[in-house]
Amino acid sequence: MSHRAIIPAIDDALPRPRWSVLIPTFNSGAYLEQTLRSVLDQDPGAEQMEIIVVDDHSTLDDPEALVNRVGRGRVQFIRQTENVGKVRNFETGLVTSRGFLVHQLHGDDRVHPGFYEAMGAAFDANPSAGAFFCESFYIDQSGAVKGRTGRERPSTGIIDGFLDEIVVAQRIQTPSVVVRRDVYETIGGFDRRLDMVEDWEMWIRVANAFPVGFVQDTMADYRVSPGGTTGSSILSGRLIRHVKDMLEIVDSYLPAAVVARCRSARSKGLAQYLTQFIPFLMERRQYRAVFRLYADALSFSAHPRAVYRLLYFTAKYRQFV
């Protein structure tokens, strides 16, 4: 059985919108309304854009009622008959989509005014690009900005050498990226073996096969929450397992020269990335998880900078011991 869904091609002779906006949800609550309104406020009309909410059998809210109220018939709603997991939920949206350009944003993310206009113009100017993404803000539960992803180049255009960059570190948050649908038709859907970091693996796969570009403006919001999925996965050790699985998957199909060139920098980056979770664990007095994180970080790299960060954060939060 394939680990990636086949995304069937669509007959170009059939009427198709330019855009497919896919909004996968699961217990997204009140955030879904913000997500929908951020898209609908830029709606170019049904001939140009389809908007599809795909709900993974939510149990804590009623997304269909919200879609009907906010979308007023403009938004298609699909509900899974049972919880299928986020990767299979993503697949449903991709297979259902008919647009030439696919934008997926989670049910608690947002896009800024002008997002679709700027992305469309970027593809018009660079038709060979498989994907374009922009800088995005990290926002908390109240919508306050807590950080940003970073600027890849000073102006809109194709990023030279982007494959090496995305192999070394995850640089794209999902609401900020638009992918041509025929790219998914070529490389398949998200990898079913992963239920974390599946997005990072996908962007590596896209960059391995197509040019990837950057749009200069910051036009997307990615919502983070303390103690959310990432926090719980650190406590359980799931995040590390999935990162290691993902690395094994991508190294199996990347050119050997790319893997060799990027391995050291990637290992150092992952070790340093893990150190940021020490405050989260120390504040919750999860000392066994702290020691496991030490081992996991050092298994990636014992670079002095990573070791320093481990010791620094531990010393800084020692009052919780």
Image: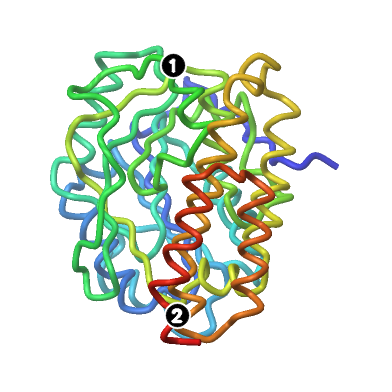
Between disc 1 and disc 2, the foreground one is: 2
Residue located at (43% from left, 66% from top): 313
Residue 23: which quarter of the image?
Answer: bottom left
Question: In the depicted view, which residue is nearer to us: 186 or 256?
Answer: 256
Seen in the picture, residue 138 relative to 313 is either above or below; the reply is above
Dot 2 lies on which element? helix
Label annotation for residue 161: 1
Q: Is residue 275 above or below residue 94?
A: below
- Measured along the vertical axis of the image, is residue 265 above or below residue 59? above
- Seen at 26% across and 63% down, the residue is 139
N-term mark: 1 or 2: 1
Residue drawn at x 41%, y 29% as measured from the top left:
100
Residue 67 falls left or right of residue 27: left
| Residue 318: assigned label | 2
For disc 2, the neighbor class at 10 Å (few under 14, some 14 to 19, many from 20) is few
Query: Which of these two is toward me, 314 or 59?
Result: 314
